[in-house]
Amino acid sequence: MSDFDDLLAANREFADSFDLGGFDGKAHAGVALVTCMDSRIDPLRMLGLTHGDAKIFRNPGGRVTPQALEALVLGVHLLNVQRILVVPHTRCAMASATEAELRVKVGESAGVDASWQSFGVVSDQLEQLREDVVKVRTHPLIGQRAKVGGFVYDVDSGLLTQHA
């Protein structure tokens, strides 16, 4: 038995009634979203979107990293992205612990020294959100080509609040 048998079985059931094929890979609603990997976030549903409407980039903390910027540039120039939302969330581990605390926790879990690992902890979530939005707005390959907004998603109410 494989460690993934349950997931492969679920995938076969999914594929039996799969009806999401045929899309061209573009963001049909013109939306791109950078958000956290937190499983409490349902990126499409929280914006009233469906399959094929948006490009979604997820990482710890919903940060605008170099990889996120790369995805956004491609989205703006090749995939119909016209609006970009940067969306961290409430009660995020990346905004509620220090880098040192996460290194200790991970090190204890791993049983090896994790003091060298970077986690991109955020000490001031709203200030970091504003900085991340500026990174996107001022990127030479994005700039005025897309509207950019910064929002915080409340994992307890499901509401977005705009902050930038």
Image: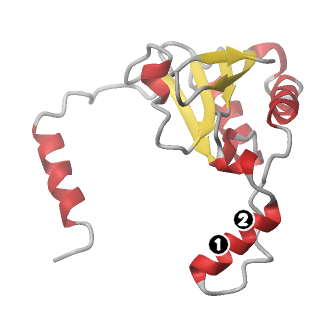
Q: Is residue 147 left or right of residue 2?
A: right
Judging depth in this view, the residue of 76 and 48 nearest the camera is: 48
Label 1 belongs to which residue?
106
Which amino acid lies under the numbered mark 2 shown in the image of this protein?
Leu
Give above or below for 153 relative to 5.
Answer: above
Q: Could you say whether the residue bearing mark 1 is in a helix, strand or loop?
A: helix
Q: Residue at x 71, y 49 (%)?
A: 94
Residue 101 position by quadrant = bottom right
For label 1, count other residues whose C-alpha is less than 10 Å away and answer few (under 14), some (14-19) or many (20+).
some
Query: Measured from the top left, where is residue 142 in percent x and y?
Result: 79, 24
Q: Is residue 116 left or right of residue 38?
A: right
**Residue 25 visible in image:** yes
Query: Measured from the top left, where is residue 151 in percent x and y?
Result: 70, 21
Judging depth in this view, the residue of 148 and 154 nearest the camera is: 154
**Residue 26 visible in image:** no
Q: Could you say whether the residue bearing mark 2 is in a helix, strand or loop?
A: helix
Query: Measured from the top left, where is residue 50 in percent x and y?
Result: 38, 19
Residue 79 position by quadrant = top right
Label 2 belongs to which residue?
102
Query: Measured from the top left, where is residue 12 in percent x and y?
Result: 14, 50
Which amino acid lies under the numbered mark 1 shown in the image of this protein?
Val
Judging depth in this view, the residue of 126 and 53 nearest the camera is: 126
Q: Is residue 9 left or right of residue 84?
A: left
Query: Do labels 1 and 2 touch, CB within 8 Å?
Result: yes
Tell me the quarter of the image containing the C terminus: top right
Q: Residue at x 68, y 44 (%)?
A: 61
